[in-house]
Image (spheres, helix red, strand yellow):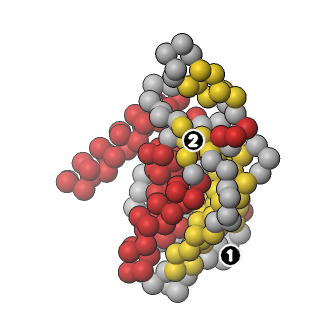
Amino acid sequence: AREDSERLHEIIENLLDISRIESGKMEMDIKPVSPGELVLNAAESFRIAARDKGVDLFSDLPEDLPNVLADTTQIAHVFANLVSNALKYTPPPGKITISARADNEEVRFGVSDTGKGIPSQYLNRVFNRFFRVPGQETETGTGLGLSIAREIVEAHGGVISADSSEGNGATFSFTLPRADRMMVLTSENEEQTWLM
């Protein structure tokens, strides 16, 4: 009964988060931040869990990446979902890589694993609420994590996607706008407004 109660509470909290983001009532502290900081913090959060499972966790960061516009707390939530999923479905001795690459207007982040992968017919549904890929051995979770990740990324003006084939691992990618490509308005009280 306690487990069912906790799971129901998690579902309700997740649905409330989605509702807040969709209605614009989720407060975002969006400011310039280093992509390297976002990636390294995500990797550090899961380093012990990966080691305990026998999975190698790497970060792949080129030098001189431009800052992105992000709410660090919310993007940490996105990374936590993507990396925890990768860890959940990657058996030892596996490998997970968290990466970032700059493009003209954005920086693309990726979480790649060497796990069992996702059958192609389900790729366009993995971000749907409550959807879980059939036949997965791990039955925990609410099926809302990727949906929340999508809402957060889209609230930042980015896009999130999945690329995988069964037996060949998976890569989840999302973009954030480059801070050096955005216009800045400074009002009379010197607060900055970023136009995305």
Q: Position of residue 35 (x, y in %)?
A: 59, 54
SS of the residue under disc 2: strand
Disc 1 to disc 2: CB gap under 8 Å: no
From the image, tell me which residue sits under label 1.
Answer: 168
Q: Position of residue 47 (x, y in %)?
A: 43, 72
Q: Is residue 163 left or right of residue 2?
A: right
Mark 2 residue type: Pro
Q: Nearer the viewer, residue 17 or 182?
A: 182
User: Marks 1 and 2, Cα distance to the nearest angstrom?
Assistant: 35 Å
Around disc 2, counting alpha carbons within 10 Å, would you say few (fewer than 14), some (14 to 19), or many (20 or more)?
some
Residue 101 visible within the image: yes
Task: Look at 52% across and 75% down and name the residue there.
Answer: 57
Q: Nearer the viewer, residue 4 or 163?
A: 163
Q: Position of residue 3 (x, y in %)?
A: 25, 56
Q: Reading the chain from its start, which is encountered first: label 1 or label 2?
A: 2
Outermost residue on the left side: it is 2
Task: Look at 41% across and 42% down and name the residue there.
Answer: 14
Q: Is residue 150 left or right of residue 124?
A: left
Which quarter of the image is occupied by the C terminus? top right
Q: Residue 32 bears which disc, if any?
A: 2
Outermost residue on the top side: it is 188
Outermost residue on the right side: it is 104
